[in-house]
Amino acid sequence: MSFVAVERAGDPETAAKAARAARGPAGRRHRPSAWHLVLLPVALLMIFPFVWLVITSASTLAETRTFPPALPAGFPLTWLANMAHNYGAAWTEAPFGRWVLNTSIVTIVVVLGNLVFCSLAGYALARLRFFGRTALFLVILATLMVPFQVVMIPVLLICKDLGIVDTLPALILPNLVTPFGIFLLRQFFKTLPIEIEEAARIDGATRLGTLFKVLLPSMGAPLATVGIMTMLWSWNDFLWPLIVITSQQNMTLQLGLSSFVGSHATKLPVLMAGTVMTQLPMLLIFLFAQRWFVQSFAASGVKG
Amino acid sequence: MAQVILEGVRKEFSGNPPTVALEGLDLTIADGELLIMVGPSGCGKTTALRCVAGLEQPTAGRIVIGDREVQDLPSRKRDVAMVFQNYALYPHLTVYGNLAFGLKEHRVPKAETDRRVREMAGMLGIEQLLDRRPAQLSGGQSQRVAMGRALVREPQVFLLDEPLSNLDAKLRGQMRGEILELQRRLGVTSLYVTHDQSEAMTLGDRIAVLNGGVLLQLGTPEEVFRTPRNVFVAAFMGTPSMNLLRGDARDGLVTAGDLRLRLAGAPDGPVIVGFRPEAMLPSRDGAGLPQVEMVVDVVEELGNETLIYGDVAGEVAAVETDATLPAPLPGAHARVCARLSGFTAVRPGEKVPLALRLDRVHFFEAPGGEALADVSPSAAV
């Protein structure tokens, strides 16, 4: 047969494009510009509270009470000794390990739940034809506009009726699916060419098979967006745990940290040590998945 | 392999008012045949293909593949495969993954899948691309992968929806040959949809011309080209398209501008006279044939032939074969095209006498557009 692939050697333009794509945005190098004069001070301003957080966690209680504020004495050995004391105290004076476990469980389950349920709902709203589809979508969108403070009491009452108040399921169940995730994924499903789905159906896949084997694997960016946004939100949530959790045993990190704030005295260095440890996982994840974070925020239109 | 029968297939899309895409389509595709469905945009050809594929549910009618009635079965149970206009390759899978996807879904054993994927890749000359992803392929390569993905499953019916329309002209010509060769070799019953009538002419065992959801003519390329059953088919098939002039028949004499033709058995009243560009000859080669005088305004020399466009006396019979083209302006002169062999000395602005080959002239009812059967014209003396 005469099926000679004329482009066997590869189209040079395609190859160049692929090479550019492989280099990615990091491949670009900018020379210093006037913008840096503005951006650099802003960056320093943004990072200052975090630096001060770390410095405070390396102070003694007395040093945090001086005015005007000053750097703690004895860098670096005394700092390290103070840190060892403060970080140790955060672990021993409260069930910090338990809180880490609780927060991790809640965050992981909520993220997975959102990925699965928002995908299913988003797909249904984008592709399945059923009565009231648009109305349902509008209702879901409308809930995005209702502040959480408005619904938290009704949600609390529902949790009470379910008998899950002051348990981890109370932190998980109400957040397993979010209107934001549904909205975002629905929009992405809409942008996928329907022919890909039709090709999969003709090739023998069921609807669910098409969703899980063909559509979702090609939706890395939007799924990462939903995952990252949900993770940040769930890890940092304070208000809902404050309302629904009372026993120290079931607290999350954010809620637990607040127990370091006493009504008469607050052990600031210990509180700051706990705060650093609470933020550390998010910081590490950010460092490793920086590209995804930036893409996520850009894609979702949410301000960081 | 199997024959495909469409019986009274009707498809209505809901709306106000509902759109009728197919109006009772009857069609039989023989076992191993390559049938081309051709027509302008919105004629219902893609809808018909999608009904066979199971991507659209016909409002009424039966679709039979082999000995199974399939109109109520989901796509995956019909044993059909399809090549899409935009290829629709799975972006997250490699070429190998794309080819193997359907086989995996049908639970073909791994070793067998591997053998078939590599065999198909060899047949299409894409072995070296198996590890690439669709984003790294050129248009022609994507096209081959899409065909491979469809054929590797050895389906009963192979459906192609304008598969070449995203390729450049040169590659399109090459791929056309490859599709034909592959189809002949595998002997798979195929339904090929295109709006490109030259593709239809060169590829098909038979051509089905559709317009407005209705099958206008079904026949071999030669039948459809030489004996169009109505004025739409006549105007749609062929490039440049057939020249159509308004005429009038009285007592067996048809007059269209300067043309006067004797036509035994023609009913009195308006008629449409049609002749393809190649039915016209330089006047000196057509002694005794009816003559027309053309005022040339455009000369296109293509090397092996020359197309000359210009005005003759008379009025063009407008047939809308493409809604995007402007309708010809009414007037006392009709613009026609003649195809002459080789180079000519004709220049724009000249008056050229041309002769018309009588055996290549077609007559259609006006306004109905149906071909007048069994009429044989002769030159009016």
Image (cartoon, coloured by chain):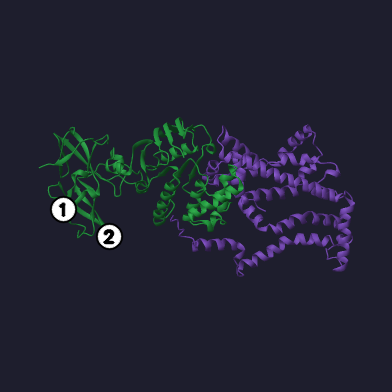
Say which of A34 and A109 sits in front.
Answer: A109
- In this view of the protein, can residue A266 be seen by the observer? no
Residue A128 sits above or below residue B198 on the image: above
Chain rendered purple: A
Chain rendered green: B
Say which of B231 and B208 sits in front.
Answer: B208
- In this view of the protein, can residue B173 be seen by the observer? yes
Tell me the subunit letter for badge 1. B
For the view shown, which residue lies furthest in the left direction?
B381
In the displayed structure image, the side of residue B361 where residue A179 appears, left or right: right
| Location of mark 1 (residue) | B285
Amino acid marked by disc 1: Asp
Mark 1 or mark 2, earlier in chain = 1
Whole-percent x and y of residue B133? 56, 55
In the displayed structure image, the side of residue B218 where residue B344 appears, left or right: left
**Marks 1/2: CA–CA distance:** 20 Å
Q: Which picture quadrant has residue A162?
A: top right
